[in-house]
Image: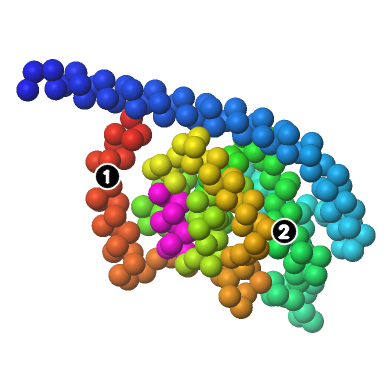
Amino acid sequence: MPGSYSDVVQIFVIRGTEYHLNRALKRMSDVLIASIAIALFAPVMGIVATIIYLTMGRPILFRQQRPGYKTAPFILLKFRTMTDAHDGTGVLLVDELRLTSFGKMLRRLSLDELPQLWNVLKGDMSLVGPRPLLMRYLDRYTAQQARRHEVKPGLTGWAQVNGRNGLSWEEKFDKDVWYVDHMSAWLDAKIIAQTIGCVFRRRGINQPGMATAEEFLGTQGEAAGQWIGSAEELGSKQILDRA
């Protein structure tokens, strides 16, 4: 069909330009909003840091290597919410026994995440994106689940405003990949607004009966097959979307 090839090329160029423009605008908004938030929350962070120092001592911040954009490692920052208590044999106690009452409050209000505003300023993270998980999870993802690393990790994300830790791992990853394919300034604004509501409602902070989320051990059986099928169905769409 005459002109069809040039039309396809034009679509790729336009979508590629839009994609890179959206990324640049997202970075600009990240820096602006994170800078304002750090200034606004500085007194709160100062109070939290003081209480942690007085109740648990140093370190005030929890630092851990996490995978970021394209799985590149970075150091995630959080306010410390647990002690380093060990049992009589020197083994670290389970999370439920190490989580302090002040730490529980910080988690309920999501205040333990505030230091990650510095990660956003540095460019390790974005305000909105899939949450940064553990490095050891990388070789447990299906190919489709690993697509969550096609964007920077975020302070909050689509999964966090749609169930958070009340979701299964597969449901979280489904929503993470959905965000990757639909990322936009409007969607980010919507997620940030919904996050504020979720913090006040305090929903989905922990999985039922657990102090923290259970470990992700990989997607097995029928669920893994569904993920592979989804990856095949979305393949042609992703080529155009990421042009």
Q: From what the image shows, is residue 41 above or below residue 28?
A: below
Query: Disc 1 vs disc 2: which is toward the camera?
Result: 2
* Residue 209 rendering spot, x and y as whole percentages: 61, 78
Taking the spot 53% from the left edge, 41% from the top edge, the residue there is 188
Q: The residue under label 1 is which amino acid type?
A: Gly
Q: From what the image shows, is residue 146 above or below residue 216?
A: above
Q: Colour scheme used in the picture?
A: rainbow
* Residue 204 rendering spot, x and y as whole percentages: 59, 65
Q: From what the image shows, is residue 106 above or below residue 10?
A: below
Q: What residue span does the magenta drawing correspond to?
A: 169-178
Residue 81 drawn in magenta: no
> In this figure, which residue is indicated by the disc labeled 2?
109
* Residue 140 rendering spot, x and y as whole percentages: 44, 60
* Residue 75 rendering spot, x and y as whole percentages: 66, 46
Q: Circle 1 sits in a helix, a strand or a loop, which is it?
A: helix
Q: From what the image shows, is residue 166 above or below residue 228?
A: below
Taking the spot 72% from the left edge, 58% from the top edge, the residue there is 109
Residue 10, visible in the rendered structure: yes
Residue 70, visible in the rendered structure: no
Q: The residue under label 2 is which amino acid type?
A: Leu
> In this figure, which residue is indicated by the disc labeled 1?
235
Measure the C-alpha gap from mark 1 to mark 2.
39 Å
- Between 57 and 151, which is closer to the camera in this rendering? 151
